[in-house]
Image (tube, rainbow, N blue to C red):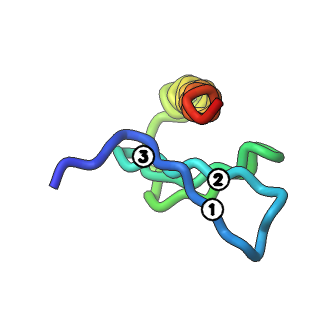
Amino acid sequence: MELPKFLLADNNNFPEDIFVLHTEFPRFLINLKDDEIEWFEDLSGEREDDITDEVSNLIESASKFYDEQVKSYD
């Protein structure tokens, strides 16, 4: 099965939160309400400069994905 790069995630226990799941390496779940990230990968062996840039790009991409999804509901 081919998965989309990002998925919206919802949970009734957290009605104010906005979750986006990134399904490719490095896999993570981000709460766009506060930009808190839960990583599903061990990134300890990665170069810090490379990861910092990639994480920034991925957070921006997750936010854009969410905005595009919300627009499609309007």
Quick one: SS at disc 3? loop
Identify the mark nearer the N-term, 3 or 2.
2
Residue 48 x, y percent position in the rendering? 55, 34
Of 69 and 28, nearer the camera is 69
Earlier sequence position, callout 3 versus callout 1? 1
Q: Residue visible at 57% across and 57% down? A: 9
Classify residue 16 as left or right of residue 61: right
**Camera-nearest residue between 26 and 74:** 74
The residue under label 1 is: 10
Q: Given this view, does label 3 or label 1 mark the residue nearer the observer? A: 1
Which kind of residue does numbered mark 3 sit on? Answer: Pro
Say which quadrant the N terminus sits in. Answer: bottom left
**With respect to residue 69, does 20 lie above or below?**
below
Quadrant in the rendering for residue 15 = bottom right
Number of residues whose C-alpha sits closer than 10 Å to that of mark 1, classed few (under 14), some (14–19) or many (20 or more)? few
Label 1 element class: loop
Q: Establish if 69 lies above or below 28.
A: above
Residue at 65 percent across and 30 percent down: it is: 74
Residue 19 is tagged as: 2
